[in-house]
Image (cartoon, helix red, strand yellow):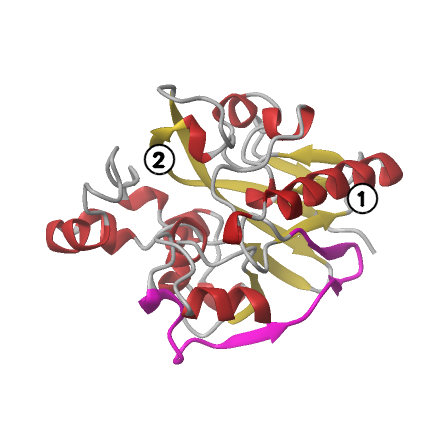
Amino acid sequence: MPANRLTALLTGTHRYEKTLSTRHRGAGVIVQAPILAYLVETPNGRILYDVGCDYSKVADPAKRARYFAPDAFTYGPPEMDESQRLSAHLQRLGLAPADIDVVFLGHLHFDHAGGICDVPGCELHVQADELAAARAHADMAYFPDEFAAHYNFRTMRGEYDLTPGVRAVSTPGHTAGHMSLWVELGSGPPILLCGDAADLTENIEHEIAPGLCWKDRDDLALASIRKLKDLAKETGAQLWPNHDLAFWGGTMAAREWHD
């Protein structure tokens, strides 16, 4: 049973050197990357894939200085205004956090998991390996308060169907338990949301690992990119990179895909 609607939500942007997206490529090139969440509406309920940043860490000067120190974030914190908060997006769509059935976290970096504070009480799906790596502070993009024990995490292992027509796809490499999402729609091709397995179209077309790889396992990251490409070929799916501004302004221009 396919999904009724897929909506891409722009929750902010982040300026950084391209080497963070393309391993060993793009030194000195600055990109402005969209930070996206996706609302998947199905006959069995609503799923959010990722939730963007915690707005308070961007808006509050003290928190911004604490979490985005210049020595770690050379080009500064993400850019985000209150209208881009997940709660604001939901309100414009006539929804409340209580209308979300599952929040599916592709991984737990701050620009993908920080916004869980705006969907209180929701069931949060995350891979066990991802949660373990985050709690071990595997890299600087994990903010410990964003995966605290009081959140309603449901730890998962491996691939599974969230609902008919929406499948969690294992794509480790960027992080230990990174997951992508395959979404079947009532008309048109399925959509494969790559998450940070592929920031840019370039990662897919030239098979380039993300700049940041868990334990420097770029072999895992490349295997995941090839897996996504094979799955897209097998199912006729479109591959959607996650931080590609040109792709956001082109293929995603309609913002909503539905039957």
Please indicate, yes or no, whether residue 200 appears anywhere in the rendered image. yes
Which label number is shown at residue 14? Answer: 2
Magenta stretch? 144-171
Instruction: Please report the residue visible at 69 percent of the width from the left and 39 percent of the height from the top.
Output: 225
**Residues at marks 1 and 2, CA–CA distance in whole angstroms:** 33 Å
Please indicate, yes or no, whether residue 127 appears anywhere in the rendered image. no
Q: Is residue 159 above or below residue 172?
A: below
Instruction: Please report the residue visible at 42 percent of the width from the left and 68 percent of the height from the top.
Output: 136
Question: Is 157 one of the magenta-colored residues?
Answer: yes
Instruction: Please report the residue visible at 35 percent of the width from the left and 31 percent of the height from the top.
Output: 16
**Element carrying mark 2:** strand
Confirm or deny contact between disc 1 and disc 2 (CB under 8 A).
no
Q: Label 2 is placed on what type of residue?
A: His
Q: Is residue 215 left or right of residue 139?
A: right
In this view, the residue in front, 196 or 223, is: 223
Circle 1 is placed at which residue position?
186
- Residue 72 appears at what percent x and percent y? 26, 44
Q: Is residue 259 above or below residue 99?
A: above
* Quadrant placement of the N terminus: bottom right
Residue 222, picture quadrant = top right
Q: Residue furthest right?
A: 234
